[in-house]
């Protein structure tokens, strides 16, 4: 509430300021509402109050895919904003749009403002960076998957709440015990494709698609139907049939079931932390995402999700300078550290992570450091740097559809994954054709 | 059907028609023509480059078993929405028509949902059947029924059908009640005096006299189910589980606005345009004929 | 009339079954709205720990105040005002152009009449969603993004109203036209003094239908209003749903949903008598 009043006051003074002076206006279209929207507005207000040359105007354009569409439609009409927040699955679409987007490294170079790519955490920025190390978009909000554990539920079921859950091999016994103790939802997950195929592949150092997961060219093909992935999905499907894995929806619907105390174990974005902390009436902790110990390369590192900010073409040099100085402001350790601590999103610079550590945040909120550690535990490989696939949002939908077939017992894991690969490849070929 | 008595001149009618012609040309025909044109190309989303593919987009679509399946899904969905919304509305209208007093009160309560936007209706029903916070799913759980429309295809279809029909029940109810009340009482009374039971009276007298209303609503509701239920599907199931609730309009949206495949989306628009054309002709033929009665 | 009707039906048990059937119907139809209202008067905690209560709680003022001042980009009051302008603009604009064009088509013979007629009727059912990208470009080229005219015009381009007026005009007895001509009335005088008053109930029915159609638009305002001060309420509700990693604030979402319902409900209920008469008229 306090934030909101402050925002309102700042917004009013800001509007006044715009009318009175000739500040350069920077339009920023984003997809955040609610608490995240308030935090975003607070950043904007702080930036606007910190200097007098530029004024950033942030507007919500619906959810991620609506914001992307609004940006595209606006570009076609010559009305594009300076900054557009695009979710990670839209990366290839934006990247292919030479002439519509201006790479961030270019914006920073031209502005003459200090910009050192080495200050950034490669595991986070890698997703949005060319193979030559040039930053294309600014990683605004990035998170990775972690495991949330309802300790009370485990205790109720007669399980040691500190039981080892670090490998999937250990899970079957725990889930069986939970199920036998009458727990209706032993395990659930959000974002099934992201957790159980995209990040799963990276974590086990397996390719998700050829050509370095699409970084190497548009002629990439999906290959997530390898034996390890099939075995994993098969195991989850088995748990689903036995009532040990409860499916609650394609997005983060399952979060409500976990926060309400129904589910014992939950894989979800690290950014779900604030919500769990706010609503959970039980003891919980955060752990590393489990991996299959039998896979030698695991654990590699998980990959990120979230969104980044793209700079759109077609504006003046002065405006780009404003954009650069705003991005610089966002990247400053204090702003970054606060964002990281308030939201659960990963810090994007080493300095922000260190500052958070110094401020004693990790000590006071155990578990919040897990996501960062999981990302940085190894140097990313070609398989774990990220994914760059056209029509990726739609490919995720296809994966969702096929996985639902497995959870409901209508399809076997290999049939579902083979079909998802085949259908997804068709979309990739369409995308390749459109962007040739 | 033509007027026998008419006014002369062409300047005045041209002036009177002008606003609608201009608006239709600029905001309908030009964009619709663009959609047809675009259906022969594979463009990139930003409009930076494009390739001519002729009928390639149509080949791609019609070769896709999932697109063909969505015709079947649409047919099932539309039939169910029409049936549920008209059936319940007719039932309620018959009951309300039997009342001497108080039908106005019921009517006032029953027409609320008509004022609710489909997007908001989707929100309300999703809220009731949410697998976690939903009241309906919780009480079903108490009764021993494990509601899970995110995985059960039949439940998902049922839910979107009910949510889409909900607002239409109000609309259809108004039409049916008006239709019933317009039937001359003397006809029904005569039949009643002859000793005809309610069901017989309904079948032989009321239903035939109601048939113009019924047919009109049939067409209107099918069109509604085809096009305006997008908001409901989008909010509640997003086309899932698997592809159980992916209707044609939802696919236009998801290919065009989720996948940014404008070529495929434009081709689907053209296919829909053809479907709409057929529906229009059917409706038009019917209404023209009926006016002759 | 209704007295006689009563004698036909048996009183007693059947009468109560009728009421019972209607009450069950009303409960089913009204329940989602009731639940939304209840949800808008309780706290988030009441909702997320099921089952949520079925009777209103004590947080009415708190939730509605929050809904009214917060909104997503713009205050709810601003969005409601924009929705109102948009709905009225569509309603009035469409009724005006449809009346005049239906008049021209029915009461005149001129070259190209049939072609115009068909051109207009082709638009009968195609929703704006299907041609949305090119329509957006047209609006942008005219510089009509973030304007009421941009919100209104593309949604006027459909022939439903023209069609209904045409149907109605065709049923107007020719004798009236004849009499007007004999009296030396010009076409426009005939239109103003005879046709328009006769169309009153049809106009009322269309007013209700179009107002609700305009008020309930979602995808179009979402695309073309980039300036928060131009947002509409229905898109505002959808925008309250978090994307990605945040939680849905149910009480405020539901309070806003209820607020968004109020104007169309007022229109429907206050005009229901005229509305129904209009429906029956245009039906026959």
Image (cartoon, helix red, strand yellow):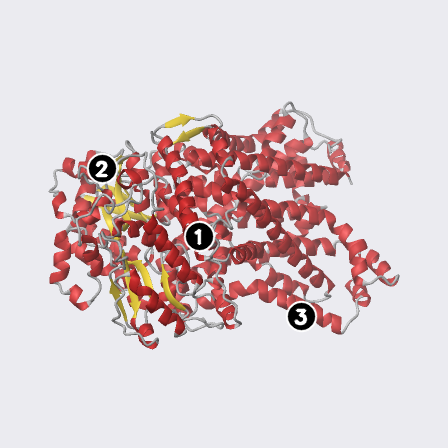
Can residue C231 be spotted in the picture? Answer: no
Label 3 sits on residue: C20
- Secondary structure of the residue carrying tag 3 is helix
The front one of A239 and B40 is A239
Q: Toward which corner of the image does residue A143 lie, by quadrant?
A: bottom left
Task: Give the number of the mark in front: 3 or 2.
Answer: 2
Q: Please indicate whether residue A236 sits to the left or right of residue C125 in the image.
A: left
Q: Are marks 2 and 1 in contact (CB under 8 Å)?
A: no
Residue ID at (48%, 36%)? C131
Of callouts 2 and 1, which one flags the residue occurring earlier in the amino acid sequence?
A: 2
Chain under callout 3: C
The front one of A251 and A167 is A167
Residue C34 higher or lower than B277, as above or below: below
Q: In 3D space, how far apart are the residues under numbered discs 3 and 1 (Cα atoms)?
A: 49 Å
**Which residue is farthest top?**
C111
The front one of B168 and B261 is B261
Label 2 sits on residue: A103
User: For the N terminus of chain B, which image quadrant?
Assistant: top right
How many numbered badges does the structure rendering display?
3
Few, some or many residues within 10 Å of mark 1 (<14, 14–19, 20+): some
Label 1 sits on residue: A412
User: For the C terminus of chain B, which image quadrant?
Assistant: top right
Few, some or many residues within 10 Å of mark 3 (<14, 14–19, 20+): few
Q: Position of residue A422 (x, y in %)?
A: 41, 41
Few, some or many residues within 10 Å of mark 2 (<14, 14–19, 20+): many
Q: In 3D space, how far apart are the residues under numbered discs 2 and 1 (Cα atoms)?
A: 43 Å
Task: Give the number of the mark in front: 2 or 1.
Answer: 1
Residue ID at (38%, 64%)? A256
Task: Give the number of the mark in front: 3 or 1.
Answer: 1
Q: Position of residue C62 (x, y in %)?
A: 38, 68
Q: Position of residue A7 (x, y in %)?
A: 26, 57
């Amino acid at each position: 509430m306090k934030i909101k009043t402050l925002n309102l006051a700042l917004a009013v003074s800001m509007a006044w300021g715009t009318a009175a002076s000739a500040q350069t206006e920077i339009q920023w279209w984003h997809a955040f509402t609610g608490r995240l929207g308030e935090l975003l507005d607070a950043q904007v207000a702080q930036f606007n109050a910190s200097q007098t040359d530029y004024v950033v105007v942030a507007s919500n354009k619906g959810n991620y895919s609506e914001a992307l569409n609004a940006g595209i439609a606006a570009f076609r009409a010559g009305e594009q904003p300076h900054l557009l927040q695009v979710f990670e699955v839209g990366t290839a679409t934006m990247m292919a749009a030479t002439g519509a987007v201006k790479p961030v490294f270019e914006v920073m170079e031209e502005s003459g403002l200090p910009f050192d790519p080495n200050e950034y955490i490669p595991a986070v920025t890698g997703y949005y960076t060319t193979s030559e190390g040039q930053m294309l978009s600014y990683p605004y909000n990035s998170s990775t998957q972690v495991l949330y554990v309802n300790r009370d539920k485990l205790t109720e079921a007669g399980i040691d709440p500190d039981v080892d859950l670090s490998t999937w091999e250990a899970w079957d016994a725990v889930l069986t015990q939970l199920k036998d103790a009458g727990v209706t939802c032993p395990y659930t997950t959000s974002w099934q494709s992201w957790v159980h195929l995209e990040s799963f592949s990276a974590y086990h150092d397996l390719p998700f698609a050829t050509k370095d997961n699409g970084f190497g060219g548009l002629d990439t093909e999906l290959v997530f139907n390898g034996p390890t992935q099939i075995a994993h999905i098969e195991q989850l499907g088995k748990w689903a049939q036995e009532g040990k894995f409860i499916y609650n929806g394609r997005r983060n619907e399952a979060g409500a079931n976990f926060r309400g105390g129904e589910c014992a174990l939950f894989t979800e974005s690290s950014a779900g932390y604030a919500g769990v902390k706010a609503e959970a009436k039980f003891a919980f902790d955060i752990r590393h995402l489990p991996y299959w110990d039998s896979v030698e390369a695991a654990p590699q590192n998980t990959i990120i999700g979230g969104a980044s900010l793209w700079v759109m073409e077609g504006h003046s040099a002065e405006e780009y300078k404003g954009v650069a100085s705003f991005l610089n402001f966002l990247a400053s350790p204090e702003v970054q550290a606060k964002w990281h601590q308030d939201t659960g999103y990963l810090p994007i610079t080493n300095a922000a992570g260190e500052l958070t550590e110094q401020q004693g945040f990790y000590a006071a909120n155990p578990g919040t450091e897990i996501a960062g550690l999981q990302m940085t535990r190894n140097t990313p490989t070609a398989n774990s740097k990220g994914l760059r696939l056209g029509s990726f949002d739609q490919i995720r939908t296809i994966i969702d559809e096929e996985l639902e077939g497995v959870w409901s017992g209508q399809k076997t894991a290999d049939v579902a994954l083979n079909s998802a690969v085949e259908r997804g490849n068709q979309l990739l070929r369409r995308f390749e054709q459109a962007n040739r | 059907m033509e007027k026998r008595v008419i006014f002369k001149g062409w300047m005045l009618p041209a002036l009177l028609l002008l606003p609608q012609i201009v608006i239709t040309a600029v905001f309908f025909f030009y964009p619709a023509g663009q959609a047809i044109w675009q259906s022969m190309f594979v463009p990139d989303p930003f409009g930076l480059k494009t390739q001519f593919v002729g009928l390639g987009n149509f080949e791609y679509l019609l070769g896709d078993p999932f697109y063909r399946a969505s015709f079947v899904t649409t047919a099932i969905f539309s039939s169910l929405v029409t049936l549920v919304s008209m059936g319940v509305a007719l039932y309620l209208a018959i009951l309300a028509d039997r009342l001497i007093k108080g039908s106005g009160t019921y009517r006032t309560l029953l027409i609320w949902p008509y004022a609710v936007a489909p997007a908001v209706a989707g929100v309300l029903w999703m809220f009731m059947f949410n697998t976690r916070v939903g009241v309906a799913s919780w009480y079903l759980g108490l009764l021993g029924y494990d509601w899970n429309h995110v995985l059960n295809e039949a439940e998902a279809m049922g839910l979107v059908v009910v949510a889409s029909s909900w607002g239409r029940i109000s609309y259809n109810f108004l039409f049916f009640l008006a239709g019933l009340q317009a039937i001359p009482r003397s006809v029904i009374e005569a039949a009643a005096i002859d000793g005809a039971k309610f069901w017989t009276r309904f079948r032989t007298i009321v239903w035939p006299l109601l048939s113009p209303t019924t047919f009109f609503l049939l067409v209107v509701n099918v069109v509604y189910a085809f096009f305006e239920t997008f908001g409901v599907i989008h909010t509640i199931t997003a086309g899932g589980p698997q592809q159980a609730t992916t209707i044609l309009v939802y696919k236009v949206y998801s290919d065009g606005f989720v996948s940014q495949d404008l070529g495929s989306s434009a081709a689907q628009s053209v296919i829909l345009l053809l479907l709409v054309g057929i529906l229009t002709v059917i409706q038009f033929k019917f209404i023209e004929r009926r006016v002759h009665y | 009339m209704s007295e006689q009707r009563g004698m036909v039906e048996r009183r007693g048990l059947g009468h109560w079954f009728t009421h019972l059937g209607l009450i069950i119907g009303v409960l089913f139809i009204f329940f989602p709205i009731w639940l939304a209202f209840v949800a808008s008067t309780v706290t988030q905690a009441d909702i997320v720990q099921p089952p949520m209560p079925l009777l209103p709680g004590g947080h009415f003022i708190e939730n509605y105040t929050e809904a009214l001042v917060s909104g997503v980009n713009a205050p709810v009051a601003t969005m409601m005002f924009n929705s109102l302008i948009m709905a009225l603009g569509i309603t009035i604009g469409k009724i005006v152009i449809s009346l005049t064009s239906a008049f021209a088509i029915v009461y005149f013979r001129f070259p190209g009449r049939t072609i115009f007629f068909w051109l207009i009727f082709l638009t009968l059912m195609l929703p704006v969603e299907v041609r949305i990208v090119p329509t957006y470009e047209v609006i942008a080229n005219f510089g009509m993004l973030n304007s009421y005219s941009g919100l209104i015009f593309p949604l006027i381009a459909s022939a439903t109203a023209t069609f209904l007026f045409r149907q109605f005009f065709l049923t107007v007895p020719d004798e009236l036209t004849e009499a007007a001509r004999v009296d030396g009335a010009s076409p426009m005088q005939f239109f103003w003094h005879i046709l328009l008053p006769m169309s009153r109930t049809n106009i009322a029915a269309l007013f209700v239908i179009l107002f609700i159609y305009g008020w309930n638009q979602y995808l179009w305002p979402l695309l073309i209003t980039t300036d928060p001060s131009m947002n509409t309420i229905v898109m505002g509700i959808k925008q309250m749903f978090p994307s990605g990693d945040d939680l849905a604030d149910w009480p405020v979402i539901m309070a806003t949903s209820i607020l968004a319902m109020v104007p169309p409900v007022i229109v429907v209920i206050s005009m229901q008598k005229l509305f129904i008469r209009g429906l029956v008229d245009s039906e026959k």
